[in-house]
Image (cartoon, coloured by chain):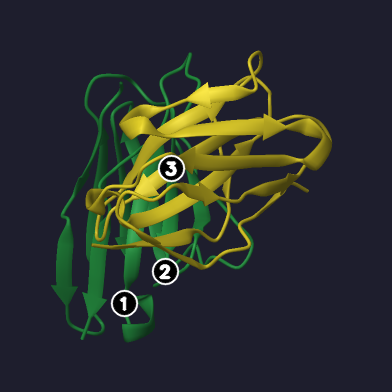
Amino acid sequence: GAVVSQHPSRVICKSGTSVKIECRSLDFQATTMFWYRQFPKKSLMLMATSNEGSKATYEQGVEKDKFLINHASLTLSTLTVTSAHPEDSSFYICSASPLIATEAFFGQGTRLTVV
Amino acid sequence: AQSVTQPDIHITVSEGASLELRCNYSYGATPYLFWYVQSPGQGLQLLLKYFSGDTLVQGIKGFEAEFKRSQSSFNLRKPSVHWSDAAEYFCAVAPISGGSYIPTFGRGTSLIVHP
């Protein structure tokens, strides 16, 4: 199956700083990628849809100025958590699908801890 | 709007025992149905999926699931659980339409396996 790689797998940052998470499709092109947030013992919540070459589409309640998404190429989307606070600590997962796909492929996830 | 219900937050079984994880969905028509597994600190791995045809679907790691239209259910089963099956299991639905797959996830069921 298709491979989606996410980096870093874990990051600890100080409150007030920004953190960038990368999501790459390794063996296919993805015009659309998705970013999820997962709280402990909770399901995945779709945060935004990342569109190559255009603005991301954010789900209701997600602050677009805090969670900046850039989809600069057909294989890379980045999520930047700006001015991070402890409440932003969470597990972030990206996913993507090849053009003719019957499932979504997920990255390994990034554990963000803001101290 | 589509929704997925996994009524069991935790399931505890003994190694070697059989397993059934429940999943019910709400959708206007029959959607695509998925089961994913997530090990601690990891992304999601697809176990199996149902699109159409035979309502009993075989997946990886010895898992199977049965789609029952009349009950709007897609329960996951395994005849003999191994200790390595301990993980979080997510049922998901996605609309049958062209384009990218954006699954809606259930809240997950945590499987605990006793030796």
Would you name the residue on which mark 2 appears?
A66
Work out whether disc 3 and disc 2 sit on a shared chain. no
Q: Which chain is yellow?
A: B
- The answer to whether B12 appears left or right of B28 in the picture is left
Q: Secondary structure at mark 3?
A: strand
The residue type indicated by label 1 comes to Ser
Label 3 vs label 2, nearer the camera? 3
Up the image or down, A24 lies above or below A45; here it is above
Chain of the residue where label 1 is placed in the rendered structure: A
Spatial CA distance of label 3 from label 1 is 33 Å
In the rendered image, residue A26, in percent from the top left (x then y), is placed at: 21, 26
Up the image or down, A115 lies above or below B43; here it is below
Would you name the residue on which mark 3 appears?
B36
Kindly tell me whether residue B64 is visible in this rendering. yes
Chain of the residue where label 3 is placed in the rendered structure: B
**Badge 2 density bin: few <14, some 14–19, many ≥20, Cα 10 Å:** some
